[in-house]
Amino acid sequence: MRTLGLLGCLAACGRIGFDANATDGGDGVRTGPLGPRWIRQLGDETIRIAIAGTAGELVGLQRFSASFAGDGVALTGQAATSSALVRYAPDGALDRTRVFDSEGSCEMRSLIVGSDTMIVAGFTSGSQTMASRGACSIVTSNRQDPIVIAVDNAGAETVIAHWSASVENAQIWGGAQYASGQLVYSGVYSGDLTIGSPLPTAMVDPNAWLAAPSDGTPTNARWAVPMSANVEVHSGPVAAYGTSAFMVGSFTSSATLIGVPVTSLGSYDTWLARINEDGSLGFFRTIGSTQPEPSFGNNTSLVALPDGGCVIALQTAGDVTFDSRTFLASDGIALVLRLDANGNLVSGMRVRDIPQLAFLGDKLYAGFRVTTEITIGGTNYVPDMGDVVIVELGPDAPIRLVSVIAGAGSQAISNLAVVGPDALGFSVVSSGELTFGATTMNTGGSLVRFVGVLGL
């Protein structure tokens, strides 16, 4: 149990450090109350779920095999791997569900939500077209082909992009949208991949690519940037703001990526690129240490900022020197860096666990797990076994404790996303007792995934 009585009350209410003047995105519109709004069990705890939203709604997207379940949700898939989409109203009521299927596999990983359209992306495979299984059911000769599908509010599906591969591995891993509405994606491939025109043959499995779909022909693209090299090059999250998109991945050894010669310090280092809306390169930087960083950008989080810069949060096992500033691994396993529009370091910090980031209004938020006492912005917090704190980040440290997902059980965060002008959505995995606002539940010894919304 907590040792500070007042703190325990605040934590149970989920309302720690809220400003009296809450943000509403600057337009005066609120989509729901301050503080914890709702939390629901959803999906497989072992598989990362994509979340996005608008106007206070939250949408979850997760791949599954055979069956998919949650509070009030029970879906069945017909492919070897299917994908489930679940949309909640601002009050947490179940709004709609959908299954993406094909004859072989339909594995969706990227999710973009607008007021009248949801856009999912990943890969499809199959030996025949089956109209009953929707737009994802396309003949690929059992290859994995990257695919982007839009779903309107009436449920109609439209293929935005379908790019053909020559061998098994060609996938979309991350996507975002420029302010103009144009889409941008990153992924990996082996062998040959045609995005409008053939990319250079991948030298190893995988190499990475970046591309923007065209406005009318699914097999075309406005532009495509290959990252073909004789070493592994992985892709990861994508974030966009205005006319700039940011993409992250990892590489090993030495290579020339988007015209920039790079050499990893450890077995894997992280690459980070800013890509302008016309496909030109804004900057290309690498982040690494003499220890291996995760090869697939595991849990790496990325947000784009209005000033043309970005913030990246990643796990780094060793000391990192970036723009002459050294960040010691002994200060925390996760590194958060803010870069300007030219890729130069603005500020940075170490934190105890890998944070998930979100930028809303003019504030940067992070959610991460804490297992020992922590002081944030003058607020002392004592977790139980392991709690999730959601904080406002300043230049070099968390400056305000916003809310917690707590309880006597063990909680860990896997996603944080803007879902409205005054709301953040999250995904956590939990075992044992969990408390969020007025809601408390206990999953016993089972590890369970939850999604929920926090009003700001």
Image (tube, grey):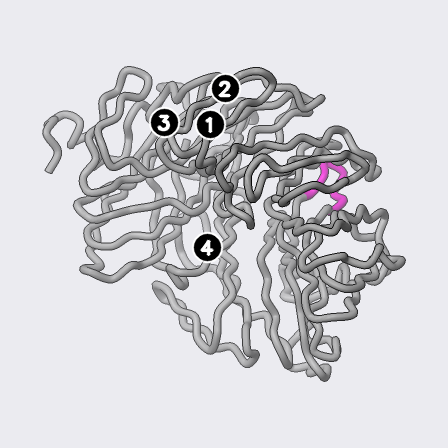
Residue occupying the point 12% across, 26% down:
4
**Could you tell which of marks 1 and 2 lies nearer the N-terminus?**
1
Identify the residue position indicated by label 4 in the image.
88
Q: Position of residue 249 (x, y in %)?
A: 62, 44
Identify the residue position indicated by label 2 in the image.
326
Give, as a three-letter code, the residue at label 4: Tyr
The CA distance from mark 2 to mark 4 is 43 Å
Quarter location, residue 37: top left
- Count of numbered badges drawn on the protein: 4
Numbered badge on residue 330: 3
Element on which disc 4 rests: strand
Numbered badge on residue 285: none
Please report contact status of discs 2 and 4: CB closer than 8 Å, yes or no. Answer: no
Range of the magenta residues?
Answer: 177-183
Decide if residue 334 is in sight here.
yes
Main secondary structure along the magenta-highlighted residues: loop
Q: Position of residue 307 (x, y in %)?
A: 66, 21
Please report contact status of discs 1 and 2: CB closer than 8 Å, yes or no. Answer: yes
Crowd around label 4: few <14 · some 14–19 · many ≥20 (10 Å): some
Camera-side residue: 398 or 315?
Answer: 315
Identify the residue position indicated by label 1 in the image.
319
Give, as a three-letter code, the residue at label 3: Ser
Residue occupying the point 37% across, 29% down:
332
Give, as a three-letter code, the residue at label 1: Asp
